[in-house]
Amino acid sequence: MFIRALASISPQPTFGADQLPAESAGYSSNRLACIEPDYKEWIDPKMMRRMSRIIRMGVATAALCLKNAGIETPDAIVTGSAYGCLEDTGLFLNRMIEFNEEMLNPTSFIQSTHNTVGAQIALSVKCYGYNNTFVHRGFSFENALLDGILLLKDNEVNNVLVGSADEITNISFAVLNRFGRFSGGAAAGEGAAFFLLTNEPDPQNCAVLDAIHTFYKPAGADAVVNEINRFLTSQSLSISDIDLIINGMNGDSANDETYHELNRGLFNSQKNISYKNLCGEYPTSSSFALWYATTMLKSEPKPRRRILIYNHYKNIHHSLFLVSSC
Amino acid sequence: MNHTDPVVYIAGLGIISAIGNNVAETLDSFEKMLPGMQEISMLDTIHRGELPVAEVKLSNKELGEFAGISPLIPRTALLSMAAAKEALNDSGVELNSSIRSGLISANTTGGMDLSEQFFADFRLDPGSGHLRDIVNHECGAVTDLVADALGIKDYISTISTACSSSANAIFFGARLIRHNMLDLVIAGGSDALTKFTINGFNTLMILDKEFCKPFDENRKGLNLGEGAGYVVMVSEKLMKGLRKKPYAVLSGYANANDAYHQTASSPEGTGSWLAMTGALKRSGLNTVDIDYINLHGTGTQNNDVAEGTAIRRLFSPEYPRMSSTKTFTGHTLGASGSIEAVFSCLAIEKGLIYPNLRFNTPMKELDFIPETKYLTGQPVNHVMSNSFGFGGNCSSLIFSKPQV
């Protein structure tokens, strides 16, 4: 399975970037907001008028990904979003309570449904094909990716656009802070990333997506090690075959304990970098990690290199991605 | 069906809705032609007395006791647990570590019922509102709660594609079995009524103030409902070890997008037609093989003309029997696809055709009418179940009598 093209909007200058940004945007606060492009170039102004920020981010990222792939309309669209359209949800909820269920406007309700990003992408590129949206917290992007992979394995499509979008709003930031999510060193993040997957070999392909795997609430670091070893074995690899590990450490020592244990053990002699200092912590941040890994492999295709991404969300949803250069 | 395709069996069913807290009560309501719509009695909203809805007549406390789970979690999770548990028990499968099992669940508003309560305080003072009321806000949190209670951890996922959500959950689950990733999947969906939902649909002006009249010329909109429905799907290998007959096999499925409008269906029903055509193609069946269509049939002007036009284009001139069971359950949104999947499987197993209540006047655009009587002893070999939603998401499932 190949990644033909990709695009990302993130708290880094990633939109339209062909390589990893030479300098990363620094943040002094614990809330990392996306660096957004001028959307006029990417979204029909008539459609854009009603779109909230997350929808714009998703639709523009999808549009750039398709442009990079040289494809007008993909065969299928699969989206992941853990929180859905928070801004519109908050707006409608607020007005509903404030005005005691009267004088409500439908727009924010209409745009609040979780499948809005995927639907608006379909509408903007007239895609009548398969369209699905996964909303399973730290598995949202991974579930979407698996759906896309299975569509390709079944030869039901020649290509599939898979991605994720999640936003942080003032409300969600305030609520997550009350849970102490960003008081221990982690920063809140957000972003959209889309990938065009295909079975067809092509000189333009950016990377090979070898495999993905998810596991839920592992019993401890030993269970995580077992899952990683099993994953690598299923690809006839061992940890020494991995050239780079990208880990989901977020800076919160309690959250990062599993990563530390791996770094002391299984990952001990591997080159190992973190990514959430760039995009912040959010349930679909693994899509940023995949963008990062693919962009790296694309820019330096030789010699053949393999990257393993390991991320967990709140130590509940764990995921592994194996990507390699073409 | 492709001959090399592994067969996916439906081994267990579970349901809770306004017409019953389990399969037996539900069938009883159909037989007695008793719809579940009433004046609002559970939900605290200004629309009480004004809009009929199809509520599950159990408080959260009663639902918690019924489902064997804490009543403090979102109502959508309570409904989900009740129906998922019934389905698993019905299948006769004892989960153990040698069975790779998954829960693929759907919902549209997650823990919104409790988020509403949190928000009422939080918006006045960001330091107030009980955190326990917002901690399960995400759609996925509802699924995790139920997966943990059932002891499922091999694959867990949540799908949200508006009113087609749980149809998509069922066929995503079936694909995981077909690809030999799982042996058993509990798949379906759940949605509780919330103020958010009622007010949202009310602003769209598509709620009927009377009981809904799907596929009637004088239809005026939909009635909202709540509930949950789950099917237990198993691989051929697991089915062979069970001492029971399967209800049905999932023989066809397809998902397409209407790509027309965020909330309205194209008048010609492009997405609906593509979904039905795709499901037929996968099943290897022809239109004449379909014995019954469980319509999406919401009762809105827009849905019924789009769906009806697509059916006319595909099936004319020979139509199977069809009906909208939303005339009993109301529109249960994220749960509707799987609730109607449960009805479809029961139709095959028991030879039933469900009535489309309150039908009087044929639609002028169509040359067919829905079935209005409750029929038993019917030969029902293949059932098509339609689910179409906001965002142009259209899905059709086909269930077939298992080959013995």
Image (tube, rainbow, N blue to C red):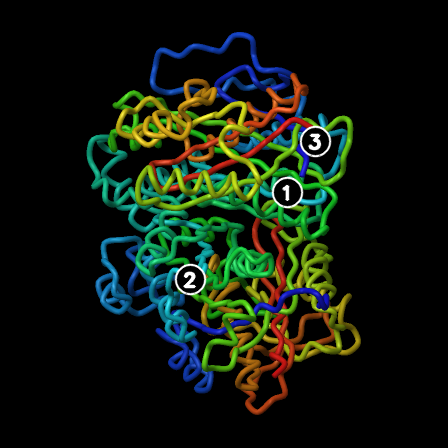
Q: Horizontally, is B234 left or right of A44 in the view?
A: left
Which x, y percent locates residue B185? Answer: 48, 62
* Chain under callout 2: B
- Is residue B249 visible to the viewer in this orientation of the structure? yes
Q: Secondary structure at mark 1?
A: strand
Q: Which residue type carries mark 1?
A: Ile
Q: Secondary structure at mark 2?
A: loop
Q: Which residue type carries mark 3?
A: Arg
Q: Horizontally, is B243 left or right of A315 in the view?
A: right
Quadrant of the drawing holding the C terminus of chain B? bottom right
Q: Which residue type carries mark 2?
A: Ser
| Eye-nearest disc, 2 or 3 | 2
Q: In the drawing, what numbered circle is on residue A146?
A: none
Packing grade of label 3 (10 A; few <14, some 14-19, many >=20) is many
- State the residue in front, B285 or A215: A215
Instruction: Please say if B241 is above or below B185.
Output: below
Residue labelled with disc 3: A4
Give the total of numbered labels: 3
Q: In the drawing, what numbered circle is on residue A77?
A: 1
